[in-house]
Image: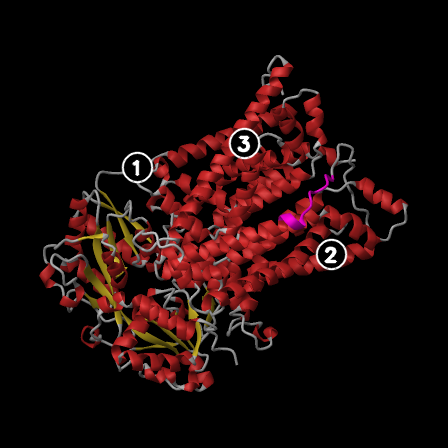
Amino acid sequence: MREGIRRFAVSGFIRSLLACLALAVAPAALAATELTVYTAYENDDLKAYKAAFEKANPDITLNWVRDSTGVVTAKLIAEKENPRADVVWGLAVTSLLVLEDMDLLAPYAPKGLEKLSPKFRDPANPPKWLGNSGWICAIIFNEAEAKKKNAPKPATWKDLANPAYKGQVVMSHPASSGTGFMYVSAWLQLYGEAEGWKFMDALHQNVARYMHSGSAPAAVAAKGEYLIGLGFDVRGSRLKEEGAPIDVIMPKDGLGWDMNAMAIIKGTKKAEAARRLMDWGVTEEANRLYGSTRAIAAIPGFAKPLAHLDKNMDERIMKQDFAWAAKNRARILAEWEKRYGSKADPQKK
Amino acid sequence: MSSAPLPAPAASAVDFSALRMKGLTLAIAAFLVLGLAVPLALMVVKSLQDARGRFVGLANYALYFSSAAPMESIANTLVIGVASTAVTIPLAFLYAYGIHRSCMPLQGLFRGIALIPLLTPSLLFALSLVQLFGNQGILKDLLMGQSIYGPIGIVIGMTFAHFPHTFIVISTALGLADRRHFEAAESLGTSRLRVFLTITLPAAKYGLTSASSVSFMLSITDFGIPKVIGGNFNVLATDIYKEVVGQQNFEMGSVVSVLLLAAAALTFLFTRLVQRRQVAMMSGRAVPYEPAPRRAFDTAVFLACAAIALCIVGVLAVAVASSFIKFWPYNLGLTLKHYNFDLAAGGGWQAYRNSLTLATCTAVAGTIIVFLGAYLVEKSRDLPRVRQLIQALAVTPMAVPGLVLGLAYIFFFNKPGNPLGVLYGSMTILVLVTIIHYYSVTHFTMLTALKQVDPDFESVSDSLQTPRYRTLWRVTVPLTMTAILDVSVYYFLAAMTTVSAVVFLYSTHTSLASVAVLNMDDAGEFAQAIAMAVVISGTCVAARVLHYLLTRGLHRRTQAWRAP
C-alpha cells in the first residue's frame, strides 16, 4: 500500500512534468501569414479592427500583443536587437517618434496616403509612420462632488489654478505616463515655456496626486475620490455613459491632443503582409472604424462626435508639434522633476 | 522501495551517489546562473551604457544622483521596508504561534485564512483600502485626517500582502519542536515567559530572521502597491517604473535596479551576520511537541488570531462586494457586468487557461528544483564553493523587482545568437521567470525545514553505506513533506497572481489572466480589475482544496511519525 502510494505520487509527478514540458516547448502553431501586431488600442476596438482587416485580407491573420503605451514602447525598444513585432498599430505618436529616433521603423507610403490630413502623417517621404485617430486633453469634472463642496465649474485650463480646488485635482505623472506628458507639453506649447511653467507652478498647489496611470485620474474623478481629473475625451465620454455624475469639459483656451499611429517595424520577415496592413490602415473603411470611437480620425470628417461631448473637434484641436515634444522630452521631464518631483506632496497641510 | 534497483556492491553505490550529488549540484547552479546571474549581469552592464549601447562608465549614476529626488526615494524605500517588517513580523509570529503552540479551536481555518492573500493579486488589497479609506471611503474617519494615499496605505497594504509569506517561514520554524525540552523546563518549574524566551524564541530564531529579511526585501521591491496607493510617496520600485515604462529609459532603470540589488545584498549580509547556524531542533531522538490545553492562554491567542483573520477576510470581502456594484459610490445597484471579460484587456478565457498551465508547471518544476537546491546547500558536503554560489543566488531574486527581472530576460533571451533564444515568447520562459522570481521565499522555507532535520541521519546513512538519495527519499522528503507541500502551493498561487516579471515576456499565445488585472487597473477600470482578481482568487481557492484532497493520504502517511 505504502509503496503503491509512493509510486503513484512519483509517476504522477513525472507525468505532470512531462506534460508541462510538452506544453511549454511546443512551438506556437504559426500559419504562413500571421502578423504580430503590437498595440495599445482598447480591447473592444481591437476586435472590430481585426475582423474588418481579416475580412478584406483573408490570407492574413493578426495576432495582437496589447499593453499600455509605456509597456509596448519599452518592449519594442528592449527587443530592438532582435525585433519580434511586424507592425505597431495604435501607439501614441510621441512613442513612435522615440522609436523613429532609434531607427526602428521601416518607411512605407501606402496607397491612398494623400487622403489623410497632413497632421496625421510623418512629413518625411516615404513616411515612417501614419496617424489613425486622435484623442483630446479634457477636464473631467465631478458635478455631484462640486455641488457638495459648492465649487465653481472651470472653463479654461487657467481656471484650474483657482485656490478653491486645493487638493482636489489629480493628473497623470508625466514621467510615468504619456498622458501626463501630453498635458505638460500642450501647456508649454499653448502658453510658451515661461508662462506654461508659471501655470503649472500654480496648478501644482492644487494637485492632490500625480498618478502613475494615464487613465486613472479620469476614473477616480468619476468616482468622486477627487473633484477634478485630467483625462482624455474618450474616457470621459465612456464614464459618463456608465452613469458617472461628471461633465467632460473641453477647455476654451486650447485643446492639446495625441494621435494613435501605425508603422512597420524594421527587419520584419513579413514585409509584404505588413505593407498590406498599412494599406488597409489608411482606407476609408478603416477611418470609419477609427471615427466610430474617437473624436478625430485621420481622414477629415470621418469621426462621429462622442456622446455627451462638444462637436467639431477637427477644427478646435490646437496645432501641436509632436516632434518638438519628443525632442525636448528629457529636458522637460528633468525640469518638471526639479520643480514638482521631489517632496511632491502638496497635500500636506 | 522495490521499484528502485539497488546497485549491487554497496561501496561503489556510495561513490556513484556522490557523483550524482555533484552532478545535481552543478545542474542547480547552472540553472540559477543562466536564469538569474547572467541576465542580471547584463542589466548591470546596461547601467554603464548610454541609449546607443556605448560604455559611459558611471555617468548614468552621476546623473541619477545629481538631483535631490533619489535620496528621498532611497529614504522612503527604507522607511517602508522597516515599517512594514516591524508591523508584519509580530503579527505573523503571533498568528503562527497560536496555530502551532496553543490548543485554540479552528486552527485549520486560521491557517487557511492566513494564506488567503497568496490567493489574490496583491493589487486587490490596495484597491480595497481605497474603497475603505479613500476620500469616499466608509472608514475614512478612522485615519483621523491622514490620507491613505501615501506611506500609511503602502504599509497597511504590504502588511496584508506579505503576511502569508512571512507566516509560512515562521510557521515552518514553529511547526517542529522537541517536546523533551518543554517537559524538562516544566519539571524544573520554569515560568512560561522564561520557556518562551529561552526555548521557543531561540528555536525560531532562524525562521524569524529569515522571515524578517523576506518581509524587508518584499517591501522594498514591491511596485504594485506603491503604484496604486502611494500617492506622491516615491520609492525606488516606482522610480524604476517611471524610468522604464514612463520614459523607456532602460539605462536609468538599470541604475535604480542596481541600487535596489545593493540594498538587498546588504540585507543578506546583515542577516548572515546576525544569524548563527541554526541548532538542529529535531534530532533523531526528538519527540514532537504537542501543546497542552490552557484555557486563558488559548482564549487570548484565539481572540488575537481571530482579529487578524477578520481583518484579512473583511478587507477582501469589501473588494469582492465592490465588484458587484454598478457604479460606486453613485449607483449602488447590483450587477454582474464587471464579470463580462469579453471586452476586457488580456485575452479572456485563453489567458485564463494559460495562467492555469503556467501555475501547474511552475508548481511541479519549481518545487523539485527548490527542494534539490536547498537540500544540496544544507545536506551535501561536496563542492562547497558551488553550494555557496547556489545559496547566494537563491536569496538574490528577493531583491530583484519583477519588472527588472523581466527586462533582464528580454536582454538575455532575445540577444541575437543566444541558443536559449528559442525560449523567447514561449510558456517555458514564463515558467522559468516565475520559478526564479519567487525562488527566495521557497528556498528559505525549504532550508528552514531542512535545518530542523538532524544531520545525524546523513552521517548514519553514510556509515551504513546507504546511498544518500535513499536517505533523501526515505527520511528527508517525508520529514519535510509539510514544507514541500507549502512550497508547491506557494508556487502555484504565485504563478496565478504574478504580474511584474511576466508583463514584458508574454506573447500572443501566452497572455495571462493576472496581466489582465494589471491592465484593467491601469486603465482605471477598477471594478473589472477586481472582478478578474476575484476569478483568479476563486481558482486559487479551488486549486488549494484540490491539492489538499489529493495529497492528504500522502501527507498522513509521511507525517505519521508525529503521532505519539
The residues colored magenta run B272-281
Q: Amino acid at mark 2?
A: Phe
- Residue A25, magenta (yes or no): no
**A58 sits left or right of A202 in the view:** left
Question: Where does label 3 land, which residue?
Answer: B25
Q: Position of residue B206 (x, y in %)?
A: 68, 47
Q: Amino acid at mark 3?
A: Thr
Is the stretch drawn in magenta largely helix, strand or loop? loop
Question: Where does label 1 land, which residue?
Answer: A29
Discs 3/1, front: 3
Q: Could you say whether the residue bearing mark 1 is in a helix, strand or loop?
A: loop
Question: Where does label 2 land, which residue?
Answer: B302
> Callout 3: residue from which chain?
B
Is B564 drawn above or below residue B505 in the view shown? above
Q: Do the CB atoms of the residues marked 3 and 1 lie less than 8 Å apart?
A: no
Q: Position of residue B414 (x, y in %)?
A: 34, 43
